[in-house]
Image (cartoon, rainbow, N blue to C red):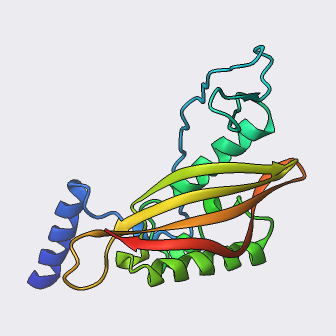
Amino acid sequence: MSRRLRGVLGSLLAAGAFGCASVPSWMQVENWHAPSISMPDLHMPSFGKGDGKAAPAPQGGVEVVTGGPEAEFNNKAVAFYQRLEGRRFDSIASYRDPGLREYFENEQTFSEYFANLAQDLVEAHFEHNAPLSTDVQEFTVEGPGRAHVRVRIQGDNGLPMRFWSTSLTREDRWERRDGKWLIIPGRADLASDTH
């Protein structure tokens, strides 16, 4: 065995002893699993009789939801938008993530939504097409099994010499189909701003 080969093997063994010889996580796309997200319990005050139904809030037309499909929708929507945080939307790993796909009826609706969101991030000049934080601003239940969500997505500005952040506000349509809340894509209403 040559001196050079022994040196390389010795280096590899030393690196393995210190845990450095593992395959980087970004190379394991096929075996990639999204981390489980633990959602906080949703405890909202009830202004009604305590039967879990929506009751009008004291301020007027706003309803406080404490149970039922609306509360399930709230939890599911918040979980989806949190999954967008820290992902690059110009990456095949994000596109292949089964954790994002479960919010869509089929491959076509997911692809349409993903493409629209990626384009919106480009137009708003998000650095690396990566949202850093999301803030669900409003849930609007339009009727049984139909709702809209307004979400503000924030990230670093990718334009040169711009140290401030950028953001966009999207409004996504959700529908309850076969007992599951799903995103129904279409060109979302959005507003972009930098600050």
Quarter of the rendering occupied by the N terminus:
bottom left
Viewer-closest of 170 and 113: 170
Q: On screen, 8 above or below 68?
A: below
Give coordinates of residue 46: x percent, y percent. 68, 20
* Residue 67 x/y as whole percent: 75, 29
Q: Is residue 193 above or below residue 42?
A: below
Quadrant where the C terminus sits is bottom left
In this picture, residue 13 sits left or right of residue 29 = left
In the figure, residue 36 lies in which quadrant? Answer: top right
Q: Residue at x 47, y 63 (%)?
A: 153
Picture coordinates of residue 169, whole percent (x, y): 52, 65
Q: Is residue 84 visible?
A: no
Horizontal relation, residue 4 to residue 16: left or right: left
Residue found at the very far left of the displayed protein: 3
| Residue in the foreground of this view, choosing between 160 and 39 | 160
Q: Is residue 119 left or right of residue 164?
A: right
Task: Name the residue located 77 percent from the left edge and 29 percent from the top edge.
Answer: 54
Residue at 47% x, 56% y is 134
Identify which residue is drawn at 57% across, 72% down: 190
Side of 159 where 193 appears, left or right: right
Q: Position of residue 130 (x, y in %)?
A: 42, 70
Between residues 76 and 58, which one lies in front from this camera angle? 58
Total numbered circles: 0
- Which residue is most to the top? 49
- Residue 83 in view in this figure: yes
